[in-house]
Structures are given as structure tokens and as C-alpha cells.
Image (cartoon, helix red, strand yellow):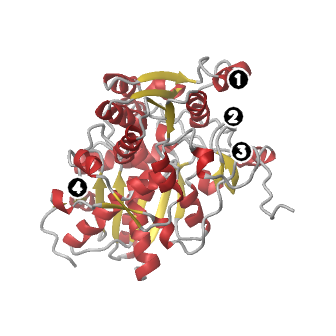
């Protein structure tokens, strides 16, 4: 067994990766095409030009294994990267497990999550193209905070449509965005056709990421000097987040150890892919036998209960069609506190890997998730975000399995953000007010009825 006298495994600034890793180069099968929402034909870069700068569009379709990180982006990354890899010795002791538990801590970024890894990159490429303003959506506010910070750093205006239930649950995340200069709206709003359409049907709509995306996309599509930005799901977002896993590979080598299982919480897939994809590369290209586990909430179980099909990324059907595990684009989530895990679909690249059996998936109720969060906080001294606590729940269960089996097991998970702005959720759990909600499988069947019908046979 490795000695591991030190708990923290740090890299120096000059050891920070100089390129992002693109898993598209190593996939065992080609990914399904992305389809135009109107014609259902494969989209071209020109189709995406109204929404994204061309550099990001080229990254979205790239099959190059590595893409260089621009020096202005790396310079900002140096404020918090490389992020620490920690061995959770006190948690191991509390669980009385022979497992060795490691976590990659992304909460040391200026806004407390992994989201700046792509926000900084996206703001940089938009600035290079002369973009005046970026419109975006956010759930719990971690993505909105990251893009607001990035916009301030590059001198770009940011407009955020924040899911209404999170806007009300997490006011300090909203104030953080406003501190960086962003404009924040509770979505659905009456500012867009998409928002007005939703409110006409449900004046009390709690909102959803799908609705907020519709509003942000509409703003970008109608204004030539505005672009749209997404904090998860898309290929270029997974690309930017790969710096997490690449650093973790180097840090595991410093620990003279290697994971048997790598775990990430999963909403749209970005933090999980960021950690997992470089390790999946090692399995696909070098035969390393590692398991990969995506953890989602029972209230939004896109991989464990959804269907693998072409669907819209937004509620009002403005976005391209992608093949993903989905609960249906009209999905309205329950108001659970893991606001960043309430998206109706899973990233296409993650979905493909899940369909191939490379990425496994499990779902948990929020009460056992918060139980795990308290166990972790009291052992390790870090308060995790509710989203990240899903990964902790799975890591603890893996460690307890190892204890029962009397087996060594090396567990690595991503602690994708801190929970300092989520204390109302912790208060609700500790007072016994949190309610578990399981998404009914019948609702997936209803969603299938409105799923777009796609025929990929060649046109005659």
C-alpha cells in the first residue's frame, strides 16, 4: 500500500497542463450528429455562428486529441490552478474502511466551483471576436457567477436568466453575480417570447434550466452583438473542464496510487466529464481497468430513468437536437436544493459513454445526500455544495462496500464546489424539513409522446 504520509498532493504552476484533452479523438465509435432544429439535418458551423464565436464552434466539432490553452486563459487559471488533490484520511477513519479516498477540490476558485474553467475560456474567445454581451442561464448560480466574473475580467457585459426557484432559494448567488456587474433575471420572465409563452401557460412556473436556456438563446439570436454561452452539456465545455482530470492524473502519480473507481455528480455533465474523461482515455488507450460512476438526483434522473434519444436542449425548441439521455425538453424539476443537477438532459459525450457501458449511473434522494455531506464536513472540515454531495454519497457507499468485503479500494471523486451559499439547504436538512422526491417513470413515458421524431436515413 502506498505510504501517503502527506494528505495534500500539489502541483506547481509550471506543471499545470498546457492543453485541454478532447475525448472525441479516442471514442470507440463516432458520436451521433447534431441536428438543425427545423430541418433535422446535420448542422454546419455557419448554423451555430449566431450563437457562438467561431473558435468555440471549431472546438465543438474538433477531433484533435489536444487543444492548446491560450496563455491569457492560463494566466487567469493560475489564480487557483492547479487545484488540490486531497486524501480524505479523516473520512476513511470515520468510516473504518480499508478504502483510500481521494478528492479533487474545485471549490478554491474565486467563485467556489469548477465553472470558471470554461467561463474564462468562453469569455476569452468571445472577446477575441469582439462580442459586446453574453446571454446565459444558470440553475443554482454557480455557472452564472463564473461567467459574470469572466465577463468582468474581459470587459464583456453578461445577462443571466436564473431559474426562478433558485433565484428565490439562493439570493446570495444572485448578489454575487451582480457584484461582478451581471444583470440577473428570475426565469421565466416577460422579457422574451419564450418566457411569456411559459407564463401564459403557467403563471406560477418555478422555471427550469430548459426554460432559462430558451430565454438566453432568444436574446442572443435576436441581437447580432450578443452571443450565447452554456456552462455544461456541450463538447467544448467538456473540453475546457478536462484540465481537472489531467491535473488529477499527475497528482495521483505523486501519491503513487491510481483509482479503482472515479466518481462525479451529474447534472449536465461538465464537472464529472472534466475529472473522468482523462481517466477514461487511460482505459480506452492504455487498458487501465477503472470504473466510472455518474451520480444524479432521484428528482432528475436523466441517465437512470431517461431515454437515449434526440431531443432539444431547451423547452421552447430553439436549440439544435442532440442525442442524449433525456427526461424530455418540457421537464419541470422539483425544487430540490441541488439546483445545478436539475437539467433534463445529459451531455451527448457522457450519454454516448453511458450507452456503451463505460460510464455507470446511480441516483440518490436528497436526504441521504445531505447525510453524507455532514459526515464529510465533520471529518474533512469542508462544506460541500449540495451537487458535489451526491458524489460524496456514492464515494462513502463505495468505501462502506470495501469495508464489508474487507477489500482495498481506491476511490477518487470530484468535490466540484463549496456549499457556503447553500446553508439554507443544510438548515432545512438539519431541521428535518427536506422532502425526498422521486421522478415518476410515467412522466418519462409522457415526455416520449412529444419527443421530436428523427429519421437519420439518407435523403432521397
Front disc: 2 or 4? 2
Q: Which residue occupies the extreme bottom position in the image?
A: 287
Q: Are marks 3 and 4 in contact (CB under 8 Å)?
A: no
Q: Are marks 2 and 1 in contact (CB under 8 Å)?
A: yes
Q: Which residue is mark 2?
A: 316
Q: Which residue occupies the extreme right position in the image?
A: 460
Query: Which numbered disc, 1 or 3, marks the residue that appears first in the sequence?
Result: 3
Query: Which numbered disc, 2 or 4, marks the residue that appears first in the sequence?
Result: 4
Q: Indicate which disc residue 197 carries.
A: 1
Label 2 neighbour load within 10 Å: few <14, some 14-19, many 20+: many
Vertical comparison of 148 with 375: above or below: above
Q: Which residue is mark 4?
A: 84
Front disc: 2 or 3? 3
Residue at 28%, 46% in the rendered image: 377
Q: Which residue is mark 3?
A: 37
**Label 2 to label 4: alpha-carbon separation:** 40 Å
Label 1 neighbour load within 10 Å: few <14, some 14-19, many 20+: some
Residue at 60%, 69% in the rendered image: 30
Front disc: 4 or 1? 1
Q: Are marks 2 and 4 in contact (CB under 8 Å)?
A: no
Callout 1 secondary element: helix
**Label 3 to label 4: alpha-carbon separation:** 42 Å
Residue 193 in the figure: left or right of residue 236: right
Of the 4 image quadrants, the one containing the N terminus is bottom left
Vertical comparison of 246 with 240: above or below: below
Q: Which corner quadrant of the image does residue 153 belong to? A: top left
Residue 116 in the figure: left or right of residue 140: left
Callout 2 secondary element: loop
Residue 317 in the figure: left or right of residue 30: right
Amino acid at each position: 500500500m502506498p505510504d501517503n504520509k502527506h494528505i495534500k498532493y500539489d502541483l506547481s504552476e509550471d506543471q499545470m497542463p498546457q492543453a485541454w484533452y478532447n475525448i472525441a479523438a479516442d471514442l470507440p465509435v463516432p458520436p451521433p450528429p447534431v441536428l438543425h432544429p427545423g430541418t433535422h439535418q446535420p448542422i454546419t458551423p455557419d448554423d451555430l455562428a449566431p450563437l457562438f464565436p467561431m473558435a468555440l464552434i471549431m472546438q465543438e466539432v474538433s477531433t484533435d486529441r489536444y487543444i492548446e490553452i491560450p496563455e491569457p486563459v492560463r494566466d487567469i487559471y493560475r489564480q487557483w490552478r492547479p487545484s488540490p488533490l486531497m486524501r480524505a484520511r479523516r473520512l476513511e477513519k470515520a468510516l473504518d474502511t480499508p478504502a483510500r479516498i481521494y478528492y479533487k477540490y474545485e471549490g478554491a476558485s474565486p467563485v467556489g466551483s469548477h465553472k470558471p474553467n470554461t467561463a474564462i475560456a468562453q469569455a476569452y474567445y468571445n472577446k477575441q471576436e469582439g462580442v459586446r454581451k453574453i446571454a446565459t442561464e444558470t440553475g443554482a448560480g454557480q455557472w452564472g457567477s463564473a461567467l459574470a466574473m469572466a465577463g468582468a475580467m474581459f470587459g464583456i457585459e453578461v445577462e443571466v436568466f436564473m431559474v426562478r426557484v433558485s433565484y428565490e432559494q439562493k439570493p446570495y448567488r444572485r448578489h454575487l453575480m451582480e457584484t461582478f456587474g451581471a444583470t440577473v433575471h428570475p426565469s421565466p420572465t416577460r422579457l422574451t417570447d419564450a418566457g411569456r409563452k411559459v407564463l401564459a401557460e403557467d403563471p406560477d412556473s418555478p422555471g427550469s434550466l430548459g426554460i432559462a436556456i430558451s430565454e438566453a438563446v432568444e436574446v442572443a439570436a435576436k441581437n447580432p452583438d450578443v452571443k450565447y454561452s452554456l456552462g455544461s452539456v456541450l463538447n467544448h465545455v467538456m473540453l475546457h473542464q478536462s484540465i481537472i482530470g489531467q491535473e488529477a492524473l499527475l497528482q495521483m502519480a505523486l501519491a503513487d496510487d491510481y483509482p479503482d473507481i472515479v466518481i462525479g455528480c451529474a447534472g449536465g455533465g461538465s464537472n464529472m466529464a472534466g475529472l473522468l474523461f482523462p481517466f477514461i482515455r487511460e482505459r480506452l488507450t492504455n487498458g487501465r481497468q477503472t470504473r466510472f460512476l455518474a451520480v444524479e438526483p432521484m428528482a432528475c434522473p436523466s441517465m437512470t430513468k431517461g431515454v437515449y434519444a434526440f431531443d432539444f436542449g431547451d423547452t421552447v425548441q430553439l436549440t439544435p437536437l442532440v442525442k442524449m439521455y433525456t427526461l424530455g425538453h418540457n421537464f419541470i424539476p422539483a425544487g430540490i436544493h441541488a439546483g445545478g443537477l436539475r437539467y433534463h438532459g445529459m451531455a451527448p459525450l457522457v450519454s454516448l459513454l453511458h450507452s456503451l457501458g463505460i460510464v455507470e449511473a446511480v441516483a440518490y434522494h436528497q436526504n441521504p445526500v445531505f447525510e453524507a455531506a455532514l459526515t464529510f464536513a465533520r471529518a474533512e472540515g469542508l462544506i460541500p455544495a449540495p451537487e458535489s454531495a451526491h458524489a460524496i454519497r456514492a464515494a462513502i457507499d463505495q468505501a462502506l462496500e470495501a469495508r464489508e468485503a474487507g477489500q482495498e479500494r481506491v476511490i477518487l471523486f470530484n468535490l466540484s464546489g463549496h456549499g457556503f451559499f447553500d446553508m439554507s439547504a443544510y438548515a432545512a436538512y438539519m431541521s428535518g424539513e427536506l422532502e425526498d422526491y422521486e421522478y415518476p417513470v410515467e412522466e418519462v413515458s409522457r415526455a416520449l409522446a412529444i419527443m421530436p421524431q428523427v429519421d437519420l436515413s439518407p435523403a432521397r
